[in-house]
Image (spheres, rainbow, N blue to C red):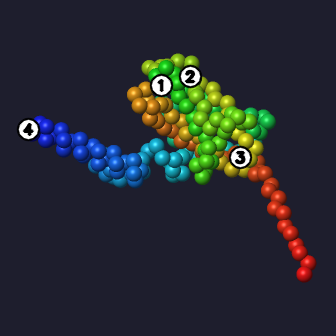
Amino acid sequence: MNRFQRAVVALSAALAAVAVLTFTSNVWPAHATGTSTAHPSLHTAARFTVIPVARDWTDGLDLTKINGTRNAAYQLTYLQAIPDGQGLVIRGKLHAFEATGAVQGTTVQGKPVPLNYPGVRSVLAIHAAQGAPAWGDFRLQVHYPPSLRGHELQLTFFVSSAKDGSRQNVLKIRIPIPGRPPVTHRASVTMDR
């Protein structure tokens, strides 16, 4: 085996070790990022930008002045509650190949939330008016289940890689949903002795 072949084998082994470390421990290696940090595709609460909403936010909220509402692919510009109280409208701009992105809804605990209630889809496609290199406008209407009232909805915006389907340009926001959570009645039984 010559020197070039030995170098290729050593490089392949190093890349395999990095892949095993990344996928088994969900930690990026320290040499890749400068510090050891959680894999960026994980849903960690600390990485979500909390959107401050009032109790009655049907008038809308300008998102352009809130840090954490834009990245290389997304610029979220406006958030408004739907008057029926079971949904919201998000407007923004998307900079992506073929003007296509996606959003996934989850609870704070990471459980999927249907974004097309009464449907069951927790991931919705986003289609902008124009594709890259332009920024295309989009409007996304989300309908969430009544059980989410009084809790928080986490939305993860992303663009899928054309090469391997991985999530890129991930933008995470957390929206407190006004209202009281549904009352759960617990049956109690008392027995006489």
Q: Residue 85: x, y in percent?
A: 77, 39
Q: Residue 115: x, y in percent?
A: 66, 36
| Residue that numbered label 2 is attached to | 128
Residue type, mark 4 in image? Asn
20 left or right, relative to 86: left
Front position among marks 1 and 4: 4
Gap in angstroms between the C-alphas marked 1 and 4: 44 Å
Gap in angstroms between the C-alphas marked 1 and 2: 9 Å
For image coordinates 35% across by 53% down, the residue present is 36
Query: Which numbered disc covers residue 96?
Result: 1
Q: Are marks 1 and 2 in contact (CB under 8 Å)?
A: yes
Q: Residue 87: x, y in percent?
A: 72, 36
Q: Is residue 81 visible?
A: no
Q: Secondary structure at mark 1?
A: loop
Q: Are marks 3 and 4 in contact (CB under 8 Å)?
A: no
Residue type, mark 2 in image? Ala
| Residue that numbered label 3 is attached to | 148
Residue type, mark 1 in image? Ala
Q: Identify the residue at the far bottom of this view.
A: 193
Q: Identify the residue at the far front of this view.
A: 1
Whichever of labels 1 and 4 marks the residue nearer the N terminus, that label is 4
Q: Secondary structure at mark 2?
A: loop
Q: Secondary structure at mark 4?
A: loop
Q: Secondary structure at mark 3?
A: helix
